[in-house]
Image: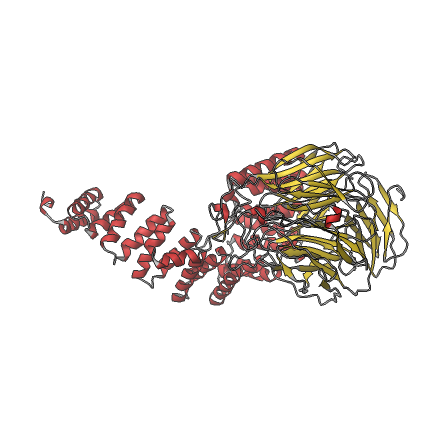
Amino acid sequence: MSSWILLWVAGAAILAGQGMATQGAAAAARTKPSGRPFAVKLVDVAAQVGLRARFVSGGETAKKYIVEANGSGVAFVDYDNDGWDDVFLVNGTRFGAGSVGGNYLFRNEKGRFVDVTKAAGMGRVGGGNGACVGDVDRDGFDDVFVTYWGANVLFRNTGKGGFRAAAWPDRGEWSTGCSFVDYDRDGGLDLVVSRYLGFDMAKVPLPGAAANCQWKGAPVFCGPRGLPFGGLTLYKGKGDGTFTEVMRREGFYGFTAVAVDLNEDGWADIYVASDSSPSVMLRNNRDGTFAELGAETGVAFNEHGYEQGGMGVAVGDFDNDGRLDLMKTNFAGDYPNLYRNIGGGIFEDVVMKAGLAVNPQYVAWGVGFVDFDNDGWLDVFQVNGHVFPGLAGEAYANPRFLYRNLGGGKFEEMGLALGRGSSRGTAFADFDNDGDVDVLIMNMHEGPSLLRNDSATGNGWLQIVGPGPGAVVTVDAGGRKQAQAVLSQSSFLSYSGRRLHFGLGKAGKVDGVTVAWPSGRTEKFLVEGVNKLVKLEEGKGTR
Amino acid sequence: MLALLQGPDALSAQALELASAGRIGEAVGLWRRAVEQAPGHFPSLFNLGFTAVRAGQDQEAAGWLRRAVTANPRDFNSAYLLGTVLARRNETDAALRAWRGALALQPGNRKLMQVMSVEYSKGRYFAEAARMAEAALQLAPEEQALYLVAIKARQDAGQHDEAFALARRALAKFPASARANFEVGFHLHKLGRWDEAMPYFEKAIAAEAGYEEPHYFRGDVLLRREDFDGAAGAFRTALEKRPDYTVARLGLARALMAQGKLEGAVAELQEATRRDEGNAQPYLLLSQALFRMGKTEEARVAKETSQRLRTARPEAMNVPQARPFPQ
């Protein structure tokens, strides 16, 4: 081969036939900084407070198969009901590495963490993906469902500081997202589990062996395109912690699954971020069935109708209109989606207008609507990380971003020093009970990050606990109505605890709290005072 | 009879005379005899290739021209023509190989550099496409077409900053050009700098009244500003100039949907499905409009059509710019 052919091949950017959906999007221009003060500082204190762990997810310097690439979720879960959010880390493993890996459980002892994995029976080793949380047997203690490449596991909380792994049928599938949800309003939690793809190591080609095994001309692991679709399975809970499969859908590469009422009809719907395939919106038909309406409601594609590499989902009312909006993170070369709920469960993608399309060069994963400065407007936090380690010209570890909500549907990226990693699952909760929201992050082949919010805003806040997964709570204060949902899973395959956190700005009081319970009942509560945690119970409010 | 006694040069000369008189079949016969006598007889090989090209017989032409290039590697025309034939046959790599040979013989041939850039892009060799286009531009900075080729190459390569810089250079060179104004506006729009883009679209419209694309993008900016009437007007103007401009009709439908004029939106989308029936996008938006009207069953049918077309005709969704780039 002559020398020019060698140069030609090396220099060419061959974008045809890649395994991931990507749009080649350019970073949108940033607007002029608002100049408004933002007194939020996020400091990584993971090691300092005892969160020492190491995430495993296949090879560290190269990944032969897609099953090594996606990492896992994390969870803030108060498993012992002591009012301090504990930390559960889902972990993967490595091919042929025996017992390398294994999940972690850390008990929160007033802001410091103690590894209780072994004693609690949570250290199962396997290809862990995601976690979702709910009290499946109504004993008052949260149970944890963990998805795997292989058999999933329901960790039943004994209520005595430990868990008992409950058997789950092994169909040799690759499960990723999950959410507990009472879809039929019978008072018991049901479960939706998303599946990524059909992965058979004996059949999957090696890197570079096919068109879907390349990235910008370089050989990489194959997929998801070209590999068999995954899908979604719905299980009906029997109320005693056991479940029966009632629905199965195929035809997409499913990741994060959120379950909440998105069309304000009082019945929980299901939204699944899908990689390189249309994302899925299952509208609850109120008769035990669902209709897939992703395309019709505007949340299956981007604003131009293209499929995207969907990863994570945030749910929150970013524009304080009382309706739950969605944000979905996507693969590199594409913008995230900010799906504004315009009513009736119909959405429009306003990501460009909102100023959130400024960092499309990263593969984006965990995402949350979080009011970091307690000003009453939900900010956006997003983590990133490439899927191909060691690829020339592509950094594996990427920065994280905090986009501050300016109101009026606009955000600005704050350029804060938030560390970097090839990050995946991310959860948000006030682990140190100081009245602001902190961030827990999974980093591939490293330990977790715990970004403690050291803000000094002087703004008020209110935390609400009690409503279970699928409940929507609206706080009326300072002339604003803010809606938030209790989610069994969100961000990327992660869980952010039962407590909802509302920033109140300078409002010195709360004018009212409304809870739309998963049962369909809506109640109003009077809350006196601010800067406190309030526990609400169904039936104790006024209709 | 006389020809039987002649050598390949005489046969070829006689064939040329016949060809000039329009007696192509007889000429081809003589050239064939010439190459039977002398298989490496370059003039006959080239002319056999050339006449096959003119007759639209590309496969046969490629065979003759390959032999011509081998017989005379110093001949530009045969290498160039071989590349052209191969490109027409979608044999991109082979075409580029032939053209690289031609370019080695005429390193300053900017027309060849332009077509090579376009072909590199088609082969998805974007870095090479960009390099070639900009080399041509250096040779002929007064040619607007070369700026456009270079812009396209950078765009295809995903090098938006470089494409934008080229658009600005083109505009500096050709400030009254509708296309140059549009290209700057287009890149600003792509970056979400909609307000900055607007004057360039307006200048493009002022410079060339019949230019539909700036009207579409002007409408898109107005849509984002939530000036729905203004947006609808701009999209309608684009459609007056080009009724089969699908994205403009989708834009019009979006503007109508934003105003709650769902029946109007549905009518436009149905028109789009008639004019561009293989395109999934009008059906997708139609499903959304029908769903908002409560026509869930019709919405489902439109969605399923969209899904079917998405799989069956994915290329129909790749919306080219309304005005093609130079080839």
Q: B226 or A297, which lies in front?
A: A297
Q: A120 or A49, which lies in front?
A: A120
- The correct choice, above or below, for A248 with respect to B24 in the image is above
Where residue A198 appears, as percent x and y from the top left, is 57, 39
- The correct choice, above or below, for B16 with respect to A359 in the image is above
Q: B196 or B150, which lies in front?
A: B150
Q: Say left or right for A92 vs B316.
A: right
Q: B8 or A115, which lies in front?
A: A115
Question: Residue drawn 51% across and 50% down?
Answer: A220
> In the rendered view of the protein, which quadrant contains the N terminus of chain A?
bottom left
Q: How is the image coloured?
A: secondary structure
Where residue B106 appears, as percent x and y from the top left, is 31, 62
- The correct choice, above or below, for B263 with respect to B99 in the image is above
Please say whether residue B117 is visible from this viewpoint.
Answer: no
Please say whether residue B146 is visible from this viewpoint.
Answer: yes
> Total label count?
0
> In the rendered view of the protein, which quadrant contains the C terminus of chain A?
top right
Q: Say left or right for B86 vs A521.
A: left
Question: Residue drawn 79% across and 50% down?
Answer: A78
Q: Say left or right for A110 vs B127.
A: right
Where residue B73 appears, as percent x and y from the top left, is 25, 56
Where residue A532 appears, as percent x and y from the top left, is 86, 56
